[in-house]
Image: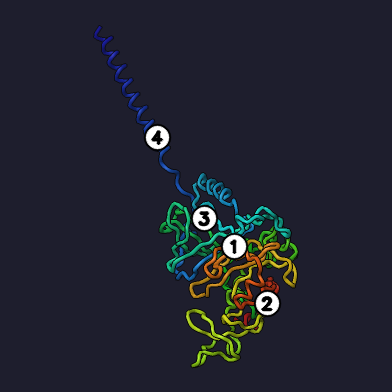
Amino acid sequence: MQAMKLRKVLVWVGLGLCMAGCALQAARAQDSAAAPAPLKYDKAWYQWLKKPWTVRYVIEVDELAKGMDKYAKKNNAKSEAKHSPEFRDYKEYVAPVLPFQGQAYASERNPLSGSMYGDLGLFAFEFDRTGQLISPHTAPMPLMARQTLDGENRTMVALSEGDGKPGSNFYALGEWWDYLPGPLGESVTPALCSAFDDGRYGVSSSARVFSPGKKFDVKEVLDPQAQGIFGCREWTYQLKRPVSVAGLGGQVPDAQGLCAGGFEPGMYKGRLVCPGLDESSHYKPNAKGFVQPYIDVTSYHDKVGKKGTIGHFIGWAGFDDPVRPVIGKFGDRWVCLHECPDGAAPGPIEDIAQWTTRRGWPLPKPGPYFVDSKFKASKEDLEE
């Protein structure tokens, strides 16, 4: 009898130990499941450069901007599943500006590209001088513009969450192309460019690898499904041409507030200066003091400017750059995309001739297109 009681006690003790062990294992398994998986990232991307931030705004324009948030959410969900914080898609958190939205013809198609007018849009980013993003967004944390070197030693611009510590999510905006050889190089650099500029001016990097010997053909860039011939170089060229450097252009007015030739001065970088023309200008001086009063982002398909569309590109302006409208011709219709005159919201320009004449501005016309072949190293470049 005593032995039987002892066996019962041992059985109950064994069961108790088993239950305790099982509970401990279950608790450990639960803790393990609750703990997040370690993030997978390259610390090199988080070596942020200590450079002053000089950019007032960045815009990305896309003829298919409407509905991009759906694709961005899917891409970000895949990155989340892989525990990767790198190169997230900001379009999940930034709503596009759709200038043709609400128009009766919004569902009609651009006859040149085939995309709908209502789908054309832009994503706009406004910054303060610290690089803090101050325009609306719904990202889970504050966003700060930061810069780091990429694999080609170019400076990449990214929006990083919070303090930008390694492992924090970041969203790539573009990269600076700082130098091109030859006399035209300084006219189009530095330029904030994107992946869509790869292949816009020469054979793309992927084609050089997978299709060696391929020749550049501008017709491929002008294809309705391609990015168009207006890109970061054309943007920078116009951005750098608000006031002439030839003759008396760019000089201060005389004691009576007048400029040579009877032209009125205009504000540039916070001071009154006289208008003028540089050697390559298509325009005449105008009463506002600028030879380039707006940025025309049209990807023209002819030399006279009758056929044009708006492709995929990014643009930018610094704190010292004058405020100028960003306009373009999308199929049959002109549109103001950003920083429109008189505080107007982005929207259609019903009559471009009336719109420009009312302000004393010249009509838009096709400008230069800066393919790689235009940039050849001079003797001085080779000697440096």
Q: Nearer the viewer, residue 55 or 23?
A: 55
Residue 70 in view: yes
Q: Earlier in the sequence, mark 2 or mark 3?
A: 3
Secondary structure under badge 1? strand
Labels 1 and 3: the sequence-earlier one? 3
User: Mark 2 touching mark 4, by CB under 8 A?
Assistant: no
Amino acid type of disc 1?
Answer: Gly
**Compared to 122, does 356 lie above or below?**
below
The local secondary structure at tag 3 comes to: loop
* Mark 2 lies on residue: 376
Kindly identify which residue carries mark 1.
347
Q: Earlier in the sequence, mark 1 or mark 4?
A: 4
- Counting residues from the start of the chain, the first of labels 3 and 4 encountered is 4
Q: Amino acid at mark 2?
A: Lys
Query: Could you tell me which secondary element the residue under label 4 belongs to?
Result: helix
CA–CA distance in space, label 1 to label 2: 40 Å
Asked if the residues shown at circle 2 and circle 3 are in contact, with their CB atoms under 8 angstroms apart, the answer is no
Question: Residue at 49% of width from left, 64% of height from top?
Answer: 126
